[in-house]
Amino acid sequence: MVTRSRGVVTVLGVCALALGCELAEITVPQGEPVVVVHAVLNVGEPTQFVILEYSLTGSNRGFRYSSGLTPPGPAGEGYPIEGATVILTHRNPGSCPTPTVFLTEQPPVPYGDGSEQGALAPSGTYVTGDLCPLAPGDRVDLRVETQAGEVVAGSTVIPGAQSIDVRTGLTAEGLELHRSIDSIWVDVDPISARALILELGRDLDRTPDVYPGSLLLGQLFTMATDTMGVVLAGDLISFDDHDDGEAVFRGGQYYTLTVAVADTNYFDFIRSFSDPLTGRGFINHIDGGIGVFGSVLTSHNDIRVIDDQDDPREGLYRVTGSFDGTPVDAVLDVYLDPRIGNVTSAFVDGTWVDGPIATSGDGSYWLNVPGSGSVHGRFDTHFATALADTVFYELVGFPGQPDRPFDVIVTSIVDFIPAVVDTLAGERIN
Amino acid sequence: MGFCWRVNAEARLGWIVGVLVAGTPILGSGEVHAQLPRAVTGQVVAAESGAPLFRARVRGLEFSDEAVTDLRGRFTLSQVPPRSVRIVVEISGFATDTVAIPVDITSLVIRLVRTSFELDPITVIGEAPTPPARIRFDSTTQTSAFTFQPGDIVNIPGMFESDVVRVVQLLPGTIAKNDYSITYNVRGGEGDQNLVRLDGITIFNPSHLGGFFSTFDANAVERVDFFSGGFPASYPGRLSSVLDVSLQDGRSDGLHGGGQVSLISSKLVLDGPIGPATFVVGARRTYADIVIAALTPEEVPYYFTDAVAKLHLPFASGASVALTAYWGRDIMDVNVVEASDGSNPNLPQRDPIDFLFDWGNQLAGVTWQQPIGNSRVVTRASITEFSTSFGIVPDFARWDNDVRLVSASSGVMTPLGEHRLHVGAGLERYDMVYDVRSPTFEFGDSPGNYGGIIPLFNVDYHPTVWSAYVDDEWNVSARLKVRPGIRVEHVPGADFTGVAPRASFKFFLSRDRAILGSFGRYYQAVHSLRDQELPITVYEFWIGADEHVPVGRSDHAVLGFEQWFGGEYQVTVEGYRKTFENLVIPNSAQSLRDVGNQFFPMDGDAWGIDILLRRHVGRVQGWLSYGFNKTERRADGSVFPPSHDRRHTVNLVMRAPGPLGSEMGLRWGFGSPLPYTGFVGEWSHRRYRPSVNAFDSGETEPISTAINAERFPTYSRLDLGFRWQFEKWGAQWNPYFQVANAYNRKNVFLYSFDFGTSPARRTGASQVPFFPTFGIEFKW
């Protein structure tokens, strides 16, 4: 397993800095630009891309790109390299007639940064859809020639696997994970691979993305290991920067577990870093520059997660009625977050405005909310349907006695603006 | 320890009582056979009470014979040359005395003065006691040697409390890379090449709080010997230096104690008799965590604590057994997720999750000293361990490192005429284990093959070192002493057998002036995987020699000159040349599954000159040292200066009468620029997202220059300390006030760069700023 923890030295370094004083800031000479390459060939993708940018040197043409994915965003920290000649050569092309392809520079794209909205930046991204088919063990070479005359090169050996097997539980059929008692088993029978990469995120098609783009950017868990088998406990806890020991898997949610086998270049790229104190430690396989030219083979696996439902608030709720003139009838299978409380997720199944749905929603369920008029508190949830990212539905209810129906106020939200409000009937059905 | 004048007065009393000749008649007056040794008997007693002193060490200064007093304080030296000679009498808690024995004296009583005994000012008659350095000058060939006693240590100002290792860092040939580091580099060597021992037992990582404190409680220390090169064959495997710390034995005349309360820690040391034995026991703890938690809503999630104990049991035969033990722990416990007991209906019941980081040393050993005729056999067995644990607990992941050394050794010293022959053998068994595992994950090496929770990373080293040595302290003539020796080390796991010849000599140009030198080969079967460039080493990551890890080697050559002036001033000039072979540095591209590629081999060499001017007695004492050093390393095709390659180092250490009746301590240090690896740019280390086939924005990381191609500015720092003394409630109290970095020089600790601005900018952090502190010591 690889982490990027700076570890003990950083901890004590901070202590030492707290005792010492900050030195005066001075200007230092501009550094020499270095060509930075980011390219990972993905065997399953129809197109391959290479990102080129110069390192930050203190020159006035560098800029910072705050967040986002590249592509589609521009190459960020540093300066995107325009007009470069980027060549991929397949060294084991077999019968493929075009082992060497020249990549095409993508047109300028928006910065994607709020302060720079509207402006365009060179993409720094070069793509091709013409690379010969990639098979395990094949070697592909990269050559970059910039307008300034720099030449950068790299080479990767394509990874592969006889099988990538993902199971949940010991005997369970399908990928449904009971987070309290089951684990996820990942088995890879490699042909040519150095490492196994796991990346877990919410299922993009069945998760409300209430903050635009956050779902795409967000990762719940990622790891790299040089073994070919991993078992993840269902009650795994996250310690990412923004988390506070939260559960990675929560009942009532859908997830996508991406399993990738990687070559040596990408494994070294992800497992090493340039130490902030010494500038050393990064394992570089790029000649004439810095970065990565690697390759992966990926497998995407959707997982439905359930859990025990011990809290009285957890269970099945049915919402029926007519929303904006359309009859709806859906069942919410509600789970509380096992570590935070009040935070809920729910499978949402049934018939909704656009037709049948099988999705999930996020929300909360508070007990004894002052002024709510209900000793059983307030729950809310929101979910998306097939029109994900543009239309959400927010449901707010104040359950009374368990066996009595209650009102559920449903609001449709289109492009993040409330559109239609209607009141439906809700009831607890188990 | 009291004020300067008081210490001197106490010590000098040893010469007031001097030598009292007992009533034994002179045997065969006028018939002494000039060529045959004679026997001298005597008794050592306490000056103030006349009580016999048990197990005092009595040894010849210009001849090779020694004895230990029995329960009645009696001793016999049977190999005394038939001429006027001097003997040295030493015992813990009393001023060491040097006594002249005329040719016609065969029996005497020696009265020693307790070092902590309070006396009124007295008229001094006779000479001051001989400093240990002078005794060493007169009697041994050892080069590059320094001896300190508690009084030397406690008067050197610092940040929080007196510290043994901080004293070592001020000696010529020794470099401390910054104010925070307890590690030191000796004559171009690495920090892991310093053998640090407590009562002969190795300590792997002798520091607390990342280097602010050493593991040695100065109040419990009896004596400190430091060898910066050319150490004799009896010392086991380290390449650069030996720091030998001896604990007090404890006093036999009742229960005594002492302690200290400072801003950050407190400590207590007790010593006294227990049956026929004596003991010393001490404990120390920082309490910022307790104080801040009591007074504020904030938490300091760190503390360290340690304890040391020694039991010394003498026997009537002159034999003795000493048991030494130490335990210390640094603990950092940060609560990441608060626990919930479920009483809040809106918060589920859950266990706490902590970031836990703790480390520390523990050791225990026994030393048995047995006189056999004129010989003395010293046998020692010990176990010492350093362990650390780092993890998110209880269930996420845990990183453990244990380093253990079990050793046994035995040596005999036999005086044979003008020879003192040392012969010994030893066995060291190291066990070093690194283990990273997680109850949350399981890993398998092949499909379906998991086999339970296996380590994410596990590597272990188990070198065994067999050793034997012989060396001879030979008084060739009145002017020439030589000490040839040889040490053989065998490491079966590394298929290694090394023969290490060592020799030293001293040629007296006059009574106070000598030329001295030494050369030797040194082997080291354990290494630390340290990053050359990191400014802080929290502790060493030890690995041991095996089929992949070589045994390190260093050759020393030292040539010097030593001059004494009036028994007070010492001037020593030494030049040295060292080579280093088979060192290791971490390989960042190591495969966790491929044991043996965790490092690159590294060679190097160093040369330099060390100069020491030291005044040992008087109202003003201290030393001025200068070191010139040039060190080079070669690894992975590169030649570079290591981060401790400091050309010029100057240290002034002084204690003198201060204002307001205080005793003042002063320490000023200067260091020429140290190397560091500069940055010439930054790059965005993005991370590929296989789930979406794109790169995220990643982290900005530096692009560096060649290794250690830049140099920091010069370093200098002045520390001042003032100590007062008064008596109350039957105890002696010493309040003190210290200022570290009195002129608040901003010595660079590290730089940080920002190449994302135009123009690029550099800032950084300084080392210890102006830092006043105070506290009080007490003893009774």
Image (cartoon, rainbow, N blue to C red):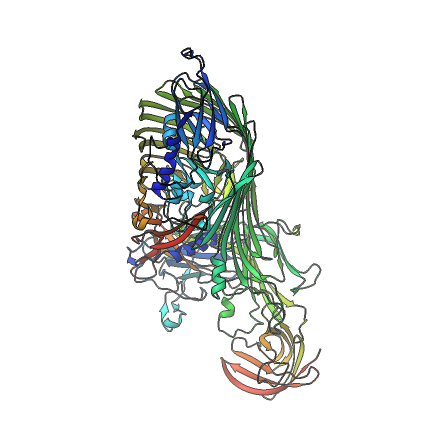
Looking at the rendered structure, the number of numbered marks drawn on it comes to 0
Which of the pair B677/A269 is nearer the observer?
Answer: B677
Report the residue at 56% width, 27% height from top: B317
Q: Is residue B227 left or right of residue A181?
A: left
Most distant residue in the front direction: B23
Which of the pair B261/A363 is nearer the observer?
Answer: B261
| Rendered location of residue B487, percent (x, y) | 48, 26
- Image quadrant of residue B512? top left
Query: In this picture, is B142 found above or below B539?
Result: above
Which of the pair A311/B573 is nearer the observer?
Answer: B573
Q: Is residue B90 visible?
A: yes
Query: In this picture, is A129 found above or below B614?
Result: below
Q: Is residue A339 left or right of residue B475?
A: right
Image quadrant in which the N terminus of chain B is located: top left
Q: Is residue B584 left or right of residue B756?
A: right
Query: In this picture, is A222 found above or below B167?
Result: below
Query: In this picture, is B366 found above or below B425?
Result: below
- Image quadrant of residue A257? bottom right
Q: Is residue A288 left or right of residue A269?
A: left
| Rendered location of residue B352, percent (x, y) | 58, 62
Q: Is residue A145 visible?
A: no
Most distant residue in the bottom direction: A325
| Rendered location of residue B374, percent (x, y) | 51, 21
| Rendered location of residue B177, percent (x, y) | 37, 45
